[in-house]
Image: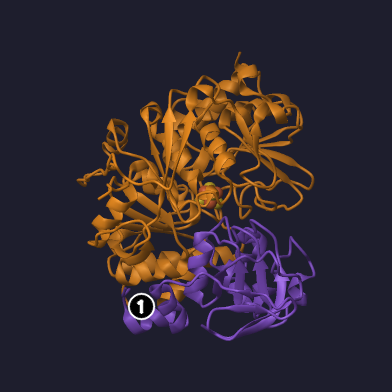
Amino acid sequence: MTALRGRARLVGDDVNTDSIISSTRKRESLDPAVLRQFLFEHVDLTFAASVQPGDILVAGKNFGCGSAMEVAVTTVLGAGIPAVLARSFSRTYYRNAINNGLLPLVCNTGGIREGDILISDGTGAVRNERSGETLSPEPLPPIMLAILRAGGLVPYMRQNGDFKL
Amino acid sequence: MAGRTISEKILARKSGQDAHAGDLVVCEVDCALGTDGSVPMALDYFKAMGGENVRDAARLVFALDHYVPPTSPQTIELHRVMRDFARRFGVTLHEAGEGIGHQLIVETGRALPGGLVVGADSHAVTYGALNCFATGIGSSDLAAVMLCGRIWLRVPDSIRVVLTGQLPSGVYAKDIALALAGMLGADGAAYQALEFAGPGVATLALEDRLVLSNLAVEMGAKTGIFPADAETVAYLQGRTGQAFEPVAADPDAHYSRTVEIALDALTPRIALPHLVDQVVALEDAAGTPVQMVYLGTCTGGRLRDFHQALAVLEAGGGVAPGVQLVVTPASREVRDAMTADGTLDALVGFGATVVQPGCGSCCGTCGVIPGDGVSVISTANRNFKGRMGNAKASIYLASPAACAAAATRGVVTDPREVSR
Ligand code: SF4
């Protein structure tokens, strides 16, 4: 798994894909470089401008519920966010994340505060620099790991042309 | 050895593997839907994957439904790109105005008992009403299906939802679905299948079952699947020439959980803004003012829904002043039937704004958009903030009859009070 070091950016429970990026924005452009300006616009107007590359989204339960629209993943990646930690994900968001190389980590995010520095050396565990707490996200099944390691579903399919278990 | 759930059996059949809950399998897909909300991105992925040809165009369906009519150069272009691709590879494309993709998959007999149907849209779960394993995917997964005809899936655990008894008058399928959402919560069925069972199933028309399957995803479910029976077969009569093999659960199948809903005891429900699991008894929200009433979507835009709504409007003497009634049939077939039996004229007579078949106002990308501070009561499946295109509006979800009852008085009203 990729090494991470970034600030925790807290969002709540049941964050739906439309609040990550409004589907009315998607109507006008699919380009993550454009859409990133509107990331979480209905939740916090200043959010998009405050994102620094490497920031890590930290959510409660059911992150990415609602529409299966994939821009809700590519926009997050376009903003320079490499990973999302959540207590749970909606399954479509989870799949889309894997397919685009956004790391979805399922773990108990309750102890993380806004701005905490989260560090992962690539072994899977995530350490909170402030609290010293180490989180152990649920391991990913082999096919998801293979897709992530390839860099997403596009390179995976270019290499394999089909799914291999 | 424990028996198997419907989901386990279908995924075993489609993967050729001995599939049990928790296993990862690679399955042949019988049919895949893409919409104007998902295909344009899927085509980019497809190209990036090196896709030169689709594996089997006959299994693919495109529907122009989210941007109907297209109102910007960008959306016109998205439609053009889809048409060009569909023509080039022989993919079936449903034009703007033909209806919502999910409804068209069902109407054209593409979702068959025992099959595996995916859709690049979360409400692809709708087809589970027809005893197929149906689930939503993103654009990248759709691109892979276009390329290789297959998909990897984790075989889900199943929650058994046992329905007993029969709905009393004034209570509808939507009330069952909302009650279930209230019980399970917005992620209560995450990564799992809902499997409907029990004697209550036979009392539900196929259109009712579609409502329940449609809302399964609002509880996080991967699919919401029904057994097949005479009602299923009757619905498919004339819609498909293809043979199909329904799948039933084994009596000793293993479920992660069983919940029971006594239909007799159910009362009207309503989901409050801004989450679908904020469900209360409708009477507890009675009196809440509403300014817009929306009848439509892949949840509540079918003929049966409009009949139920119209009956209440007639009993209540029409639409109260200050209320905007918006009607969007789920498909052209639905609209034609409404025209033929006078439902559409009657609704127009009550002052309804009729939008052409498609997603309409549901997700705010087309159709009528509520104004700031407006409260909407809708037959849809989602009430997230901003869902209908305005984050300053509030959305309540209820049955078509309850929506119509609210239209007659301008406040949330128990439909049983109006029809009395
Ligand atoms: S009607 Fe609404 S929920 Fe259904 S597919 Fe269209 S936008 Fe999605």
Position of residue B403 in the picture relative to residue B199 (left or right): right
Position of residue A53 in the picture relative to residue B149 (left or right): right
Of B169 and B40, nearer the camera is B169
How far from the left and from the top, in percent, is residue B194?
43, 45
| Residue at mark 1: chain | B
Q: Quadrant of residue B33?
A: bottom left
Task: Indicate whether A129 appears above or below B199.
Answer: below
Of A84 and B66, nearer the camera is A84
Chain A's colour is purple
The colour scheme is by chain
Q: Residue at x 54, y 55 (%)?
A: B66
How far from the left and from the top, in percent, is residue B212?
47, 39
Could you classify mark 1 by the number of other residues whose Cα lies within 10 Å: few (under 14), some (14-19), or many (20 or more)?
many
How far from the left and from the top, in percent, is residue B399?
57, 32
How far from the left and from the top, in percent, is residue A77?
60, 77
Q: Is residue B252 visible?
A: yes
Task: Indicate whether B33 appears above or below A7.
Answer: above
The residue that disc 1 covers is: B51
Chain B's colour is orange
Q: Residue at x 55, y 44 (%)?
A: B184
